Image: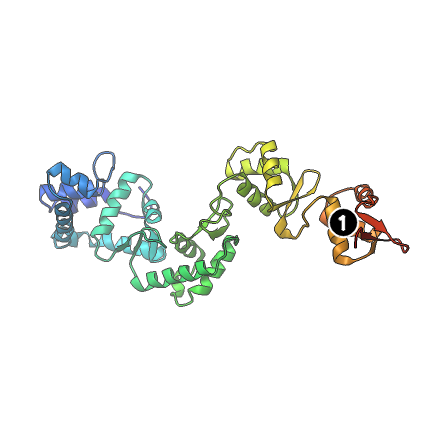
């Protein structure tokens, strides 16, 4: 049992269902998984058990809920419904069904009984999963609509490549829900609201973005490597990338395989012996010779020392490596003033 609630859900549902005819009670128990094993049955499966149509089962279920709500037993449980309503308000007024039930109880069996109590309470409204949102319960239609509209606006303002720290995502979301009551605007509630959306999500590193982005829904070694290097914030050796994939994502990453994947992906730039950076950080692609060429094409004729200085900002190599490349007369030439240019320019 959770310390969140004072009542015992199984005892409450027993008292509430006691007012029903036997078959109606059995139908409700089957629909909500109140029996042994906690498995919830479909309308069709229950219909087959009793030799009736699924529509007839639905009618029995609706009758049962209506009958319980009109009963004296329901009135006697007013304190239970009030307590649950207060919990829902404390969680933000609208909560993902899975999160609400796991907050109230840890075991699945008790959660099924709580789900029935919520379904019976006429102050609780359940919105089914749709294209944008997960199954959720709420006690305030206005707040729910405001939150959902704000989440849609938040999603529209995100690009596939966006990766936001949780604090940034919360700040961005708050910009879109200024009309929501201030009493709900605390960090824990905002995080619960973010989880309502199916279109934005959080990755294993706690960063937020569009749910189907490779930065959030990581699908392979390259995506894991991208997040690891990004989190590191500076060039990192591929052996350490492999170790951190194991550490952060609990995924086996062979060193050689990791190196091969990094080489193939344009998101990564080899900037030194085994050192990789992200292309989005502005590093030039290619080997040292390519980097020298790009620097000369951008800056025009410059001295040896200027070339060394600029290459070392792009690559973690020895000065001698740069000098060896500069002496390749097939690609570079030195003019009478001692400045270098690209052959053919």
* Residue 54 visible here: yes
Q: Residue pushed farthest right?
A: 336
Front residue of this view, candidates 225 and 171: 225
Mark 1 is surrounded, within 10 Å at the Cα level, by few (under 14), some (14 to 19) or many (20 or more) other residues, namely: many
> Does residue 8 appear in the picture of this structure?
no
Quadrant placement of the C terminus: bottom right
- Residue 198 at x, y percent in the picture: 39, 51
Question: Mark 1 — residue?
Answer: 292
Point 22% across, 47% down: residue: 116
Q: Which residue is at the far left? A: 21
Residue lying farthest bottom? Answer: 179
**What residue is shown at x 30% (from left), y 61% (from top)?**
140
* Most foreground residue, 164 or 296: 296
- Mark 1 lies on a secondary structure that is helix
Residue 322, percent from left and from top: 79, 44
Viewer-closest of 336 and 55 = 336
Residue drawn 30% across and 39% down?
A: 108
């Amino acid at each position: 049992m959770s310390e969140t609630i004072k009542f015992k859900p199984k005892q409450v549902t027993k008292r509430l269902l006691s007012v029903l005819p036997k078959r109606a009670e059995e139908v409700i128990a089957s629909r909500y998984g109140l029996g042994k094993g906690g498995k919830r049955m479909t309308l069709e499966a229950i219909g087959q058990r009793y030799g009736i149509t699924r529509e007839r089962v639905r009618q029995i279920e609706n009758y049962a809920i209506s009958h319980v709500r009109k009963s004296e037993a329901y009135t006697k449980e007013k304190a239970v419904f009030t307590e649950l309503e207060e919990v829902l308000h404390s969680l933000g007024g609208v909560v993902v069904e899975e999160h609400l039930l796991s907050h109230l109880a840890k075991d699945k069996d008790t959660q099924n009984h709580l789900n029935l109590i919520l379904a019976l309470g006429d102050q609780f409204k359940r919105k089914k999963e749709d294209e944008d949102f997960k199954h959720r319960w709420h006690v305030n239609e206005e707040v729910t609509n405001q939150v959902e509209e704000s989440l849609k606006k938040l999603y529209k303002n995100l690009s596939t490549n966006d990766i936001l720290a949780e604090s940034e995502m919360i700040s961005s979301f708050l910009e879109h829900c200024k009309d929501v009551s201030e009493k709900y605007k605390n960090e824990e509630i905002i995080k619960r609201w973010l989880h309502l959306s199916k279109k934005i999500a959080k990755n294993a590193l706690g960063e937020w973005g569009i749910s189907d982005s490779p930065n959030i829904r990581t699908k392979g070694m390259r995506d894991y490597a991208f997040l690891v290097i990004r989190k590191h914030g500076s060039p990192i050796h591929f052996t350490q990338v492999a170790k951190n994939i194991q550490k952060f994502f609990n995924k086996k990453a062979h060193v050689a395989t990791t190196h091969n994947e990094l080489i193939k992906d344009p998101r990564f730039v080899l900037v030194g012996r085994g050192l990789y950076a992200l292309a989005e950080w502005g590093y030039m692609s290619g080997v040292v010779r390519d980097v020298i060429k790009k620097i000369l094409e951008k800056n025009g004729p410059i001295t040896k020392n200027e070339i060394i200085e600029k290459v070392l900002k792009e690559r973690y190599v020895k000065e001698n490596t740069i000098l060896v490349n500069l002496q390749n007369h097939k690609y570079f030439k030195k003019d009478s003033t001692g400045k270098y240019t690209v052959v053919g320019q």
